[in-house]
Image (cartoon, rainbow, N blue to C red):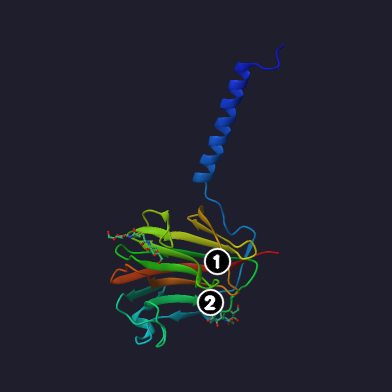
C-alpha cells in the first residue's frame, strides 16, 4: 500500500476545511457569555454620580424610570463643571470602583435614538497622558464605533443592545462585546486609575440633541 493516497489526502483536506469553516461560523453566530468567571459587584445609587451641564438641574438632563436611565444633552450646553473646558456631557460616572489592576467588566443594555451622533456613549476613563481614556464607544451616523476608528456595529439606532466591555489591566487589553459577540480587541493605554462611565458625552461633529438610555448596568470583576 502506498503511503500517500491522493484521493484520501484530498478527502482529508476537504474535511479539515469544512471543520475549520464550521468553527469560524460557530464563532461568528453563537454568542458567548462574556461574564463567565466574573463576579457581579454591588451596584446602586451609592455607586455613581450623574455628571451634567453645571448650570441646569439634573432632572432637565436625566431620568430614572422603571429601571431605565435616560441621559440627554445639547451641543450648546455647558460642561459639567465651571472650570472644565470639555464638551457637554450627561453621564453616569461610576464611583467607588476605581481600579488599577485585575480584570474588570462593564455590562449594560443600551439604546440610542435615531439622530444622536458624534457622541461617546460609554467610556473606560483613565489612561496615560496625553490620553484621558482607555476606551470610548461612540455613535456616528448610526454606527456604533471604537473612538472614530473602527465600526463595531453598523446599524445601532432605535433598538436595545447588550454591551460588555472587558478591561484586562494586567495584560493592557480591552474587549468589546455587542449582543454577546466579540466585536473588538484593542490595546490599553496605560494609566493608574480607571473607572466606567456611560451616557452622552459630545465629540466633534456632534448632533444638536444627544441621548442614550441604559438599563441593567452591572460592574463585574474577574474571580481570582
Ligand atoms: C447600596 O448597596 C450597599 C451595599 O450593598 C448598601 O449598603 C446601601 O445601603 C445601598 N444603597 C442604596 C441607596 O440602595
Ligand atoms: C475615582 O476616579 C474618578 C475619576 O478619575 C475621580 O474623580 C475620583 O476621585 C476617584 N475616586 C477615588 C476614591 O479614587
Ligand atoms: C458622519 O456623517 C457626516 C455627514 O454625512 C460626515 O461629515 C462625517 O464624516 C461622518 N462621520 C463619520 C465618523 O463617519
Ligand atoms: C478621528 O479623531 C482624530 C483625533 O481626534 C482626528 O484627528 C481625526 O480627524 C478623526 N477622523 C475622522 C475620520 O473623523
Q: Secondary structure at mark 2?
A: loop
**The N terminus - image quarter:** top right
Q: Quadrant of residue 187?
A: bottom right
Q: Residue at x 57, y 35 (%)?
A: 20
Q: Residues within 10 Å of mark 2 (few under 14, many from 20)?
A: few
Q: Please name the residue that numbered disc 2 is placed on.
A: 44
Where does the image place residue 131, in percent across and percent down from the top left?
A: 50, 71
* Mark closer to the chain start, 1 or 2: 2
Q: Is residue 40 left or right of residue 114?
A: right
Where does the image place residue 175, in percent across and percent down from the top left?
A: 54, 58
Where does the image place residue 44, in percent across and percent down from the top left?
A: 53, 76
| Quadrant of the picture in which ligand 4 is shown | bottom left
Q: Is residue 197 above or below residue 38?
A: below
Q: Is residue 58 above or below residue 203?
A: below
Note whether residue 67 is visible.
no
Q: Quadrant of residue 116?
A: bottom left
| Furthest-front residue in this view | 130
Q: Residue at x 39, y 71 (%)?
A: 200
Q: Please name the residue that numbered disc 1 is placed on.
A: 189
Nearest the viewer among 201 and 94 is: 201
Q: Residue at x 49, y 76 (%)?
A: 93
**The C terminus - image quarter:** bottom right
Q: Quadrant of residue 99?
A: bottom right
Nearest the viewer among 131 and 26 is: 131
Nearest the viewer among 78 and 95 is: 78
Q: Is mark 2 within 8 Å of ligand 1?
A: yes
In front: label 1 or label 2: 1
Q: Secondary structure at mark 1?
A: loop
Note whether residue 16 is visible.
yes
Amino acid at each position: 500500500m502506498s503511503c500517500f493516497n491522493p484521493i484520501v489526502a484530498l478527502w482529508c483536506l476537504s474535511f479539515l476545511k469544512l471543520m475549520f469553516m464550521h468553527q469560524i461560523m460557530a464563532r461568528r453566530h453563537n454568542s458567548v457569555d462574556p461574564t463567565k468567571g466574573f463576579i457581579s459587584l454591588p451596584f446602586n445609587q451609592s455607586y455613581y454620580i450623574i455628571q451634567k451641564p453645571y448650570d441646569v438641574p439634573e432632572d432637565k438632563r436625566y431620568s430614572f424610570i422603571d429601571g431605565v436611565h435616560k441621559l440627554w444633552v445639547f451641543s450648546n450646553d455647558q460642561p459639567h463643571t465651571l472650570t472644565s473646558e470639555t464638551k457637554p456631557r450627561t453621564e453616569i460616572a461610576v464611583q467607588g470602583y476605581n481600579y488599577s489592576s485585575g480584570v474588570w467588566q462593564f455590562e449594560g443594555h443600551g439604546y440610542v435614538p435615531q439622530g444622536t451622533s458624534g457622541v461617546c456613549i460609554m467610556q473606560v476613563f483613565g489612561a496615560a497622558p496625553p490620553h484621558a481614556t482607555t476606551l470610548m464607544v461612540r455613535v456616528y451616523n448610526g454606527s456604533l464605533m471604537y473612538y472614530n476608528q473602527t465600526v463595531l456595529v453598523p446599524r445601532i439606532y432605535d433598538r436595545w443592545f447588550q454591551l460588555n466591555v472587558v478591561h484586562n489591566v494586567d495584560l493592557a487589553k480591552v474587549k468589546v462585546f455587542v449582543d454577546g459577540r466579540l466585536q473588538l480587541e484593542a490595546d490599553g493605554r496605560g494609566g493608574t486609575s480607571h473607572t466606567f462611565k456611560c451616557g452622552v458625552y459630545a465629540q466633534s461633529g456632534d448632533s444638536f440633541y444627544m441621548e442614550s438610555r441604559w438599563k441593567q448596568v452591572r460592574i463585574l470583576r474577574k474571580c481570582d
